[in-house]
Amino acid sequence: MRWAILGCGQMSSALVLGTQGSEDFSGENFFCFDPIVERAQDLADQIGGSYYSRWEELPAADIYLLGCKPQHFKDLASSIHASLPATASLLSIMAGVSVEIVRGQLGSQRAVVRVMPNRAALLGMGVHALFCSSNTSDDLLSEVERFIGASGEIFLFDSEEMIDRITGVSGSGPAYLFKLAEELAAKLVEMGISRRTANLMVAQTLLGASTMLVNNPHDANQLKDSITSKGGVTQAALEVLDRGGFDQLISSALDAAYQRTKEL
């Protein structure tokens, strides 16, 4: 299988790097292109692929991964539309760019698979929401699932609207946890804990909690209650979060993420 990676930023690179070390991809060809040539070269060097400084130099591929920023898609589409192989399929990871828009720019007959991934793909622990155009073949879907499944869990949706709705959680969610970790560690440092120890303690706490969520049959609310003793330390902290409108703040943040997704 020949893959053309159009845009070698952090997310597309994470997906491609997620395939490395798997025998399933030992015979795959990856052609890397990015307006910032150093990015394409760096990714190609890491995966044993080829990089190109001009779009016109890329060999024909079977699947083209559209990994540019959403606001740059029209420029990319105008550059590649005329020379895109007629049989090529498209894999889009652009936030907020619908399948209809992609097909409108690159050919209404093309099969398009849209994926909303997240950065944990680098660790093989990504969350990948997927939607397919109606003309996506079983073979194409199988190839895409093989590709993105190498770096995380796949969640297939029948409605593209759901991809936009979950982007603020699966796509942006790690940033919220990093923000939480930043604030928790900062408070520990304020209390006299060294920065290194604070960072490690917070990271391990979040890792342990996440592992409990994955491996426990109970939902987050039940797990929260299981460690909250009446009148105890955890309850005191949670009451402050409740008084501060923590629930509504999270809801508003996700609403803002969804709105931005639609704007893109």
Image (cartoon, helix red, strand yellow):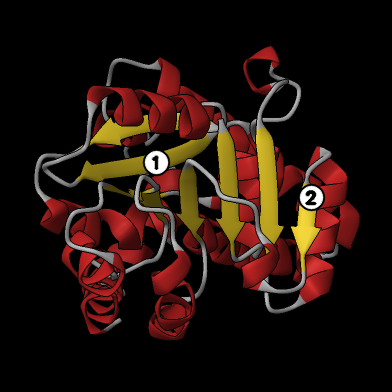
Q: What residue type is labelled 2?
A: Ser
Which quadrant, please, contains the C terminus? bottom left
Q: Which residue is drawn at 68% across and 36% down?
A: 29
What SS does tag 1 mark? strand
Q: Quadrant of residue 78?
A: bottom left
Q: Is residue 12 above or below residue 100?
A: above
Q: Which amino acid does label 1 sit on?
A: His
Q: Nearer the viewer, residue 262 or 178?
A: 262
Measured as percent of width and height from the top left, residue 246 is found at: 30, 67
In this rendering, position of residue 214 left or right of residue 136: right
Q: Please indicate whether residue 99 sits to the left or right of residue 92 in the image.
A: left
User: Residue 128, labelled with which disc?
Assistant: 1
> Label 1: how many residues lie within 10 Å, few (<14), some (14-19) or many (20+)?
many
Is 164 in front, or is 100? Answer: 100
Residue mark closest to the camera, 2 vs 1: 2
Compared with 106, 91 (above or below) is above
Q: Which residue is drawn at 51% across and 39% down?
A: 126
